[in-house]
Image (cartoon, rainbow, N blue to C red):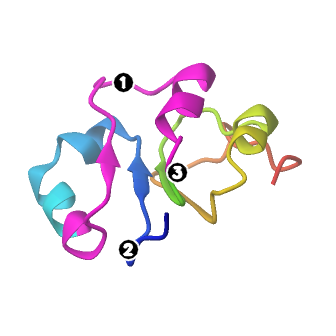
Amino acid sequence: MSHAFPRLAVTPPAFCRSKILRTELTRFFPHSTFNTKDRYLSEDELIDFLQEAQGALIGRDPVTERVLRAHPQLRVISKYGVGLDNIDPEAL
């Protein structure tokens, strides 16, 4: 099913706790989903969380080859915060 707005999955706990950030993001991407666990997700949890997402805003969650292979529908991955240690550049 195609949507006029892409589905975004947002994982960083600090972003997800911020009412202002959630409100602003959903103004432009109303089909956004937010991590409610108040912690970073494991590889298995991230695979489950990204099921219907076309885009992802990632914090320190592990973006591995396994995660990316499970989600060929992902078109954009944006990093929230500093550092890229959790992202496998070979898998991109």
The reply, left or right, for residue 88 in relation to residue 74 is: right
Residue 5 image point, x, y percent: 38, 74
User: In this figure, which residue is indicated by the disc labeled 2?
Assistant: 5
Residue 39 image point, x, y percent: 36, 24
* Label 2 residue SS: loop
Q: Quadrant of the C terminus?
A: bottom right
User: In this figure, which residue is indicated by the disc labeled 1?
Assistant: 39
Residue 32, quarter of the rendered image: bottom left
Q: Residue at x 42, y 57 (%)?
A: 8
* Label 1 residue SS: loop
> Sequence order check: which comes first, mark 1 or mark 2?
2
Q: Looking at this view, is 13 or 43 the one in front?
A: 43
Residue 85, quarter of the rendered image: top right
User: In this figure, which residue is indicated by the disc labeled 3?
Assistant: 82
Q: CA distance from mark 3 to mark 2?
A: 27 Å
The reply, left or right, for residue 90 in relation to residue 69 is: right
Q: Are marks 1 and 3 in contact (CB under 8 Å)?
A: no
Residue 17 image point, x, y percent: 18, 40
Residue 77 to residue 86: above or below: below
